[in-house]
Image (cartoon, rainbow, N blue to C red):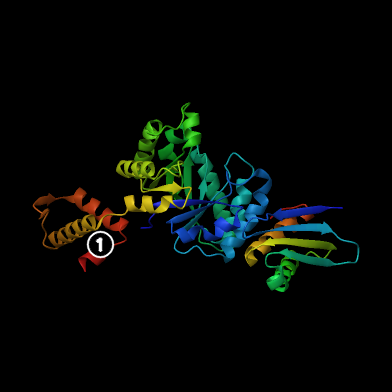
Amino acid sequence: MKTTSAGTIESMDCLVTVTEGASGNGIAVTITGSSATRFGTAMKKTVLATVKELQYTGDISIAVQDNGALDLVLAARTKAAILRFLGGVA
Amino acid sequence: MRLRRTKLYLPGNNPNMLLRGHLFEPDGVILDLEDAVALSEKDTARILIQQVLKRGEFGNCEVTVRINGMDTDLWRKDIEAVVPFGVHGVRVPKVEDPREMQLLDEALSEIEDKAGIAQGSTLVFCLLETALGIHRAYDIAISTKRIAAICPGGEDLTADLHTSRSDSGVELVGPRRMVVLAAHAAGVCALDTVFSRIADEEGLRKETEFVKQLGFEGKSVIHPNQIPIIHSVFTPTPKEIDTAKRIVAAAAEAARRGLGAVQVDGKMVDRPVVKRAAFTLQRAGITEEEVQG
């Protein structure tokens, strides 16, 4: 199963892992780590907005392991992980 | 005139440092895509820096990105990733050939055109890290109008000179003098290399005083603790500012009255002294117009 990741679990960063999903499952997002309970919904929104920006519509699961990443860092790591998954870079 | 007393290096793949570096109030930050980023992480660092440029804050800092060298296949992707998003300039490592800077100039112009940025607005800061680069310093400094500063290297340069860094820094005296001469002849800034012994505050102060005396206008910085020390050396004292104000004011008054030279504190003041005083005021952030009322 194809898996790519970007980022780290250092302070103010997050590790975003993208895995090939089962056909028809769409885009599944899971958030764990320091901000997951309080900001999980907003973080999920950022991840999905980044996927939309990249115009990706396939089946993937995106796991975010957070250690206090700001929204812009989460967006950057998500974009990098997806581009790696797609085999290209910005 | 923009002050460039300190330029703080920030690793390009480290959100914590990228987002907080400006809080230490350096005159500029260098978002590093070169040595601080592993080859396997260049792509993620570019995307992170792009996001930070688009949505982050840098206060009053001059923001530059150190791109990968012109001898790699990475530099084009670097500038494409960052130039459209609001950098003041790019810092180029291991510059040896003026033609490389013309190539960079053309590539920057293309990107600026596509991004709707004024052509020529992205400045270039050249790191001269080899004997050949130092030898060609003047030609590099005048290679394009974008060149804002030339800077001698440290570790790479001493290796190329078949020597090593010493406490006294004697091995870099010659290259530093050549860079200062070339920079001032070309009308660009001379910015010094980093001081790598982070805990040695006295050594940093001595080296900063030395390079200031040579004619450098600032230093690169690898730790925030180095910033206030370097600023204190490059910032004129209240007494120096007061003297400079009186010299500039006296020269302006003499010019109004059609006189060639005047006296300040019992000393003749001629053009070089006025020029130096004006530069002191620039370093203090005071304009000549403010002095003349």
Q: How many marks?
A: 1
Q: Which residue is mark 1?
A: B288
* Quarter of the image where the C terminus of chain B is located: bottom left
Residue B100 in picture, x, y percent from top left: 53, 41
B117 left or right of B46 in image: left
B47 sits to left or right of A24: left
Quadrant location of the N terminus of chain B in the rendered image: bottom left
Q: Quadrant of residue B292?
A: bottom left
Coordinates of residue B34 in the picture (x, y in percent): 58, 45
- Residue B159 position (above or below residue A11): above
Residue occupying image coordinates x 78% and y 55%: A85
Residue B54 visible to the viewer: yes
Q: Residues within 10 Å of mark 1 (few under 14, many from 20)?
A: some
In this view, the residue farthest toward the left is B266
User: Compared to B100, does B166 lie above or below?
Assistant: above
Find residue B147 and report its horizontal and vertical position in percent. Answer: 45, 48
The residue sitting at 72% across, 60% down in the picture is A65
Residue farthest top in this picture: B162
* Residue at the far right in the pictured view: A23
Q: What's the amino acid at mark 1?
A: Glu
Left or right: B76, with B117 as reference point: right
Q: Left of A78 or right of it: where is B52? A: left
Which residue is depicted at the point 59% across and 39% down?
B71
Q: Quadrant of residue B243?
A: bottom left
Tell me the chain of label 1: B
- Please name whichever residue, B224 or B102, is drawn nearer the observer in this view of the structure: B224
SS label for mark 1: helix
Residue B181 x/y as whole percent? 34, 39
- Is residue B112 in sight in this rendering? no
Judge whether B213 appears above or below A32 on screen.
Answer: above
